[in-house]
Image: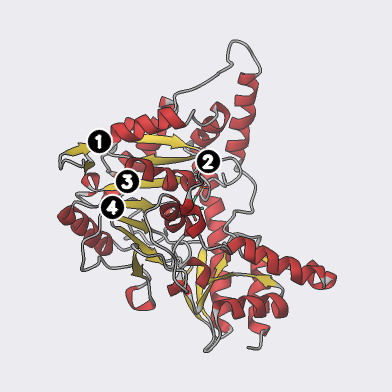
């Protein structure tokens, strides 16, 4: 007899996006006219096509693959040297951050990396996760057996939840008790909050004092407008000794369907063995990647490289400006509708408080039925997300303007 992984049975059944899909489908099936008017501001996926510099690089790479002389088979598992060098140079060293080319690991997505990183971390770690948050951090820890069962509001035993509220600007403060691994996401999905330098300094100080590791998800760093907000955890002195950073080309280059991301593991980052010795994680992650992964395709890595060309950079800046223009429209619209609005200034997400007495899912249903707009209920991101909903700025400008208008017409 074969045994299954019982941890999977602990996962809460109704994962957020399938439930949204179910409700939207039920609504549209009975209402063809409203289905026509439907505008989706739900799932965090980009809407605009790839930058022309990327498209040109893709075509060129395909042609190279078509000729025997330039054809490529397996590449290095950690990524081609030229892409690792471009990333380390443009994203880090050009900003005065000390990161070596071989501390960059190219992958097919940050979502996978956020989950896979648990392969190189021990099973006894006390895990701290923001609430609300990107559901991947919690669910991958459940799958790995790092948690107890879920309670009525979906909180799992053994995880230390770090509440994100208006009073802390939705950036958690370090806990009073010891934790070993901390997930931080800034700019944040779903709240749109971005951690200040002082907030990140407090976390690095905590991590160094507790010999803990920060898993820093910077998928939205390109959306930071405020020059005082750090783009990387490594802008904070000491972070090379306590942090792993995840980055992705999904939200800056529009690579959600192309698939390319990277993880930074500094060679100076150590963790403890069972016998109490401190050893670097870098060789473990290198071993993990070479064993379980065969690299991102040559074509896609050339596409990612093109994002660092002068044209690529200008085109990414234009994409971000487009989405952030939408965010401004949506923020203003929700505010004029009398709603309390957060985020949307350094991130493509607007985090809105529901009117008094209205739950997140009630707000979802109301906005779906009365405004024919799909948003994301905050409670789907964690129990502290109850009483909020997320509006995504990934859309056309016309749709963002229309959503802003419909929100103002809505009678609660
Ligand atoms: C979109 C997103 C990512 C990127 O994931 P990919 O697998 O690289 O597409 C990572 N973290 C968060 C919080 C995200 O919202």
Labelled pair 3, 4 in contact (Cβ < 8 Å)? no
The image shows residue 136 at horizontal and vertical percentages of 47, 55
The residue singled out by tag 1 in the image is 267
Give the percent coordinates (x, y) of residue 9.
Answer: 51, 56
Q: Judge depth for marks 2 and 3 and give the one in front.
A: 2
The residue at the point 27 percent across, 59 percent down is 200
Pointer 2 residue? 2
SS assignment at label 2: loop
Disc 1 packing (10 Å; few <14; some 14–19; many ≥20): some
Residue that protrudes farthest toward the front in the picture: 1
Residue occupying the point 36% across, 30% down: 287
Task: From the viewer's side, name the closer residue of 128 and 374.
Answer: 128
> Which residue is nearer to you in this view: 167 or 132?
132
Q: Nearer the viewer, residue 143 or 182?
A: 143
- Between disc 2 and disc 4, whose residue precedes? 2
Disc 4 target residue: 125
Which is more N-terminal, label 1 or label 2? Answer: 2
Q: Is 152 rendered above or below residue 212?
A: below
Query: Where does the image place residue 349, in percent across and percent down from the top left?
Result: 51, 65
> Can you identify the residue that label 3 sits on?
244
Real-space CA distance between mark 2 and mark 4, rounded to the nearest whole angstrom: 28 Å
Give the Cα separation between the discs numbered 2 and 3.
36 Å
Quadrant of the rendered structure where residue 338 is? Answer: bottom right
User: Is residue 274 visible to the viewer in this orientation of the structure?
Assistant: yes
Query: Gap in Å between the C-alphas at discs 3 and 4?
Result: 16 Å
Question: Mark 4 or 1 closer to N-term?
Answer: 4
For disc 3, the neighbor class at 10 Å (few under 14, some 14 to 19, many from 20) is many
């Amino acid at each position: 007899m074969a045994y299954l992984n019982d941890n999977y049975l602990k996962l809460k059944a109704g994962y957020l996006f399938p439930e949204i899909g179910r409700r939207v489908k039920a609504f549209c099936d009975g209402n063809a006219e409203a289905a026509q008017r439907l505008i989706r501001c739900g799932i965090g996926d980009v809407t605009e096509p790839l930058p022309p510099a990327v498209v040109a690089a893709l075509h060129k790479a395909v042609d190279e693959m078509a000729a025997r002389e330039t054809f490529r088979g397996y590449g290095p598992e950690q990524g081609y040297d030229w892409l690792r060098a471009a990333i380390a140079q443009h994203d880090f060293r050009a900003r005065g951050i000390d990161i070596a080319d071989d501390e960059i690991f190219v992958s097919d997505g940050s979502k996978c990396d956020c989950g896979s990183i648990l392969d190189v971390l021990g099973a006894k770690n006390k895990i701290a996760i923001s609430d609300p948050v990107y559901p991947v951090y919690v669910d991958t820890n459940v799958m790995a057996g790092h948690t107890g069962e879920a309670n009525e509001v979906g909180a799992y035993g053994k995880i230390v939840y770090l509440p994100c509220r208006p009073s802390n600007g939705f950036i958690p403060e370090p806990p009073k008790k010891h934790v070993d691994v901390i997930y931080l996401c800034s700019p944040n999905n779903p709240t749109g909050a971005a951690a200040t330098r002082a907030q990140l300094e407090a976390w690095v100080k905590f991590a160094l004092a507790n010999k803990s590791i920060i898993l820093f998800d910077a998928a939205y760093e390109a959306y930071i407008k405020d020059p005082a907000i750090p783009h990387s955890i490594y802008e904070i002195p000491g972070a090379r000794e306590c942090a792993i950073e995840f980055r992705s080309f999904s939200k800056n280059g529009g690579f959600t369907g192309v698939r390319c991301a990277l993880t930074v593991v500094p060679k100076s980052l150590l963790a403890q063995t069972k016998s109490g010795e401190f050893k670097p994680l870098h060789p473990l992650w290198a071993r993990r990647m070479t064993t379980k992964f065969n690299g991102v395709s040559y074509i896609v890595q050339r596409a990612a490289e093109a994002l660092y060309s002068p044209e690529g950079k200008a085109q990414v800046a234009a994409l971000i400006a487009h989405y952030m223009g939408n965010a401004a429209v949506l923020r203003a619209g929700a505010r004029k509708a009398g709603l309390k609005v957060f985020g949307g200034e350094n991130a493509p997400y607007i985090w809105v408080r529901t009117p008094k007495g209205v739950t997140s899912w009630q707000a979802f249903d109301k906005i779906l039925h009365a405004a024919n707009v799909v948003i994301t209920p905050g409670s789907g991101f964690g129990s502290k997300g109850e009483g909020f909903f997320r509006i995504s700025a990934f859309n056309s400008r016309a749709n963002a303007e229309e959503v802003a208008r419909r929100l103002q017409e809505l009678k609660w």
